[in-house]
Image: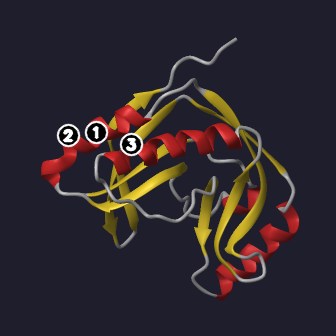
Amino acid sequence: MRAFVSVDVPRPTIPELIATAAAPSHLTLAFLGEVADARAGDLEAAVGRGVAGPAFTISFRGIDAFPTARSPRVVFVGVRDGREALEALAGRVRSALTTEGFPFDPKPFVPHLTLFRVRGPRDEERARRLLDRFADADLGSAPIASVELKSSELRRTGAAHHVLASYPLAPASP
């Protein structure tokens, strides 16, 4: 199975994106790729050991792009408040995966919510409009109350994701 670990969030409302196909609304903490079905139980246990700490809230701030805004290939919404808590959560999950021998994409964790991939001139034009208009915009907030282990099935219409296990975070401190 093709697997990843994420937190689900509501998609920020951006009028220019309402009419387009929406990408999944999650922030990936670790992408594992192919994992043998026989190791599914070990994977679920490893993620469970990595999930610790209280629930928290993040805020979305600005639209940006990878690799750069001048050469956009992936357009995303950035995370401002709650970024440190999200990075710490990703670090704990990644550490638990490493301890149990599960390889994952080694790129540094950059908290972001992917909006779309630039696949042609029309996408590039749309990316430039969004980057110009929303580079520093406040785009709402989202509670982070659980972590999901998901499988991903690639289809012609895009990836279909299925929750394999859900791990609630502790209630937030008052």
The first of marks 2 and 3 along the sequence is: 2
Residue 156, compared with residue 2, is above or below; it is below
Pair 2/3: label in front: 3
Amino acid type of the residue tagged 2 in the rendering:
Gly
Q: Residue 44: give its label.
A: 1
Distance Cα–Cα, label 1 vs label 3: 11 Å
**What residue is shown with label 3?**
96
Image quarter hosting the N terminus: bottom left
Q: Residue 41: give its label.
A: 2
Q: Report whether 70 appears left or right of 54.
A: right
Is residue 161 visible in the rendered image? The answer is yes
Distance Cα–Cα, label 1 vs label 2: 5 Å
Asked if labels 2 and 1 touch by Cβ distance under 8 angstroms, the answer is: yes
Q: Residue 164: x percent and y percent?
A: 29, 41
Q: Residue 171: give its label.
A: none
Task: Identify the secondary structure beneath mark 3.
Answer: helix
Amino acid type of the residue tagged 1 in the rendering:
Glu
For the residue pair 131 and 92, the one nearer the viewer reads as 92
Q: Residue 102: x percent and y percent?
A: 30, 54
Distance Cα–Cα, label 2 vs label 3: 14 Å
Task: Identify the secondary structure beneath mark 2.
Answer: helix
The residue lying at 64 percent from left, 29 percent from top is: 56
The residue lying at 52 percent from left, 45 percent from top is: 91
Image quarter hosting the C terminus: top right
The residue lying at 79 percent from left, 76 percent from top is: 128
User: Farthest residue in the bottom direction?
Assistant: 121
User: Farthest residue in the top direction?
Assistant: 174
The first of marks 1 and 3 along the sequence is: 1
Q: Residue 157: x percent and y percent?
A: 39, 69
Is residue 10 visible in the rendered image? The answer is no
Crowd around label 3: few <14 · some 14–19 · many ≥20 (10 Å) = many
